[in-house]
Image: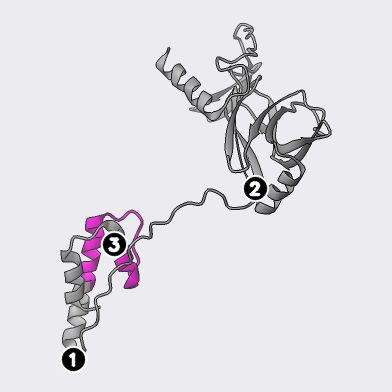
Amino acid sequence: MSNEEIQTFLSKDPTIQDLRRYAKMMGINLKRTMKKKDITRVLKKFAQKSRQTSSTTTAKSSPSEILRPSKPVDAQIPSSYSRDFVVIHPVNPYWVYVMWDMSSWTARSVSDHSSKLLVRVSDITNIIYDGKNAHRFKEANISPDAGNWYFQVDFPDADYIAEIGYYIGGNFNSVLKSKITRTPRNSPKFSDYEIWVDLKKGSRKEYKASHEELVFERATKSSGPTDNPSSEEFIKTISKSKSGR
């Protein structure tokens, strides 16, 4: 790469992404923390070295084609990757978020047995779940390409599991099952003991807490809708809580 080619490239005021790709193309290692002016300075320094090297050689080289960084491709993220999975994440003490994806084979297998596909969220706190012994559950009719759903749950600090399946003969047949997730607490957790640190001595000691006993009523209802909510209802509930209406 000649000095003239580098100077021509810099005169076009390239973006920092173009500068990084150009430097990589020439084999120049850059730090991630470098700004645009720092990269420009490195390229100018490299151009000066190439000019000094070319001046010492007597052979004349034919001008080569100016290499320019490739333009980014306008790629779209696919709506499905045709993989079988379902995951559940806690949003807050009273809401969980379920997302899933299904392969074409699984979708055909489900459609052969039932026309209705459901997503179920079950409360399995302090039990070994066998598919039928959940404390309580909530369901929603879905389509395979829906991809996600919000559920309002009854209790904070509880274990929940999500399943995709259908009913056959009055029994729920689970096709996909998530790992267990736990909703956060809705109140502070107090301990009977406190750890105090002496910064001067660097020692740690444990003392019995001296606070008065506080009783917190465990709330079992949320401010959201009472039936199985949809994603739009979840957004409306959050918007109302933020606006205070």
Residue sitting at x 64%, y 23%: 153
Residue 200 position within the rendered picture, expressed as x and y whole percent measured from the top left: 48, 27
Report which quarter residue 152 is drawn in.
top right
Image point (70%, 53%), residue name: 105
Point out the frontmost of discs 2 and 3: 2
- Amino acid type at mark 2: Met
Pointer 3: residues within 10 angstroms few (<14), some, or many (20+)?
some
Query: Circle 1 is placed at which residue position?
Result: 60
Q: Which secondary structure, mark 1?
A: loop
Q: What's the magenta region? A: 19-46
Nearest-to-viewer mark from 1 and 2: 2
Q: Give, as a three-letter code, the residue at label 1.
A: Lys
What is the three-letter code of the residue carrying label 3? Answer: Asp
* Quadrant of the rendered image containing residue 60: bottom left
For marks 1 and 2, the one nearer the N-term is 1
For disc 2, the marked residue is 102
**Left or right position of 39 against 229:** left
State the residue position of label 3.
18
Residue at position x 61%, y 16% in the image: 226
The residue nearer to you, when weighing 202 against 221, is 221
